[in-house]
């Protein structure tokens, strides 16, 4: 193996760096404020249960007001250290994402709706041959998903747009 002049120093520095990283990792202690938890096999989830929602499915949901007017969409969910949802960040205002600003609304102010927006409609279901209500469609025919169709916030588009902007920390 042929090394260029000075390459031995670079190689030695790289090896020393890797060794010190490993030593630091071994010396790292768990956060003193959080006790170690032993996970037992009885704690494993093997399937999404009724009433559980995937956060990844919530981001991007449309947000409407009480008049079925779209006022924004969910940009982020803010949780505390215990995992409790504290706020829903809604992208408000703007056009096609330009000029949009984020507003954090307390989680308790959001109503989650599993039915599509608008008045219930009926159609014939090819599988069952019956006339069904779109609000019940997903639940009754096994098409239910484990997250809401949209969110409702009791605000106008202008009220949401005028609310204080939410700033993310780094």
Image (spheres, rainbow, N blue to C red):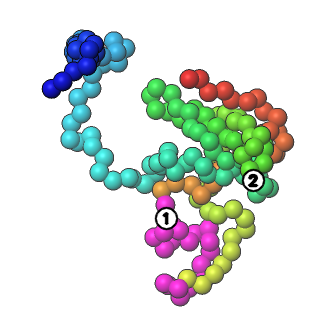
- Circle 1 sits in a helix, a strand or a loop, which is it? loop
Residue lying at the far right of the rendered structure: 158
Q: Which mark is residue 31?
A: none
Disc 2 residue crowd, few under 14, some 14–19, many 20+, Cα 10 Å: some
Earlier residue among tags 1 and 2: 2
- SS state under label 2: strand
Vertical relation: 75 (above or below) 51? above
- In the image, taking residue 79 as reference, residue 94 lies left or right, namely right
User: Given contact means CB atoms under 8 Å apart, are the residues at marks 1 and 2 in contact?
Assistant: no
**Is residue 132 or residue 28 the one in the foreground?**
28
The span shown in magenta is 126-145
Provide residue 162's location: percent of width, then percent of height: 82, 35
Q: Identify the residue under disc 1.
A: 144
Relative to 34, 141 lies left or right: right
Q: Residue at x 61, y 34 (%)?
A: 87
> Which is more foreground, mark 1 or mark 2?
2
- Residue, x 62% and y 38% (percent of image)? 88
Does 140 lie within the magenta span? yes
Residue sitting farthest toward the bottom: 129
* x and y, in percent, of residue 58 in the image: 55, 48
Q: Is residue 21 visible?
A: no
- Quickly name the residue at label 2: 70
- Quarter holding the N terminus? top left
**Does 131 appear above or below 151?**
below
Residue shown at 50% from the left, 47% from the top: 56
């Amino acid at each position: 193996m042929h090394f260029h002049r000075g390459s031995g120093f670079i190689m030695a520095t790289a090896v020393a760096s890797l060794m010190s990283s490993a030593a630091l990792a071994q010396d790292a202690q768990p956060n003193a404020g959080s006790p170690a938890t032993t996970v037992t096999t009885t704690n494993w989830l093997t399937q999404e249960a009724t009433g559980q929602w995937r956060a990844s499915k919530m981001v991007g949901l449309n947000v409407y007001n009480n008049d079925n007017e779209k006022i924004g969409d969910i940009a982020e969910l803010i949780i505390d250290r215990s995992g409790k949802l504290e706020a829903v960040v809604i992208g408000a205002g703007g056009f096609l994402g330009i000029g949009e600003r984020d507003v954090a609304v307390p989680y308790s102010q959001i109503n989650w709706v599993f039915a599509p927006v608008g008045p219930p409609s009926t159609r014939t279901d090819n599988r069952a041959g019956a006339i069904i209500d779109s609000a019940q469609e997903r639940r009754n025919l096994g098409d239910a998903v484990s997250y809401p169709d949209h969110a409702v916030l009791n605000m106008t588009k202008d009220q949401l747009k005028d609310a204080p902007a939410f700033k993310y920390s780094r």
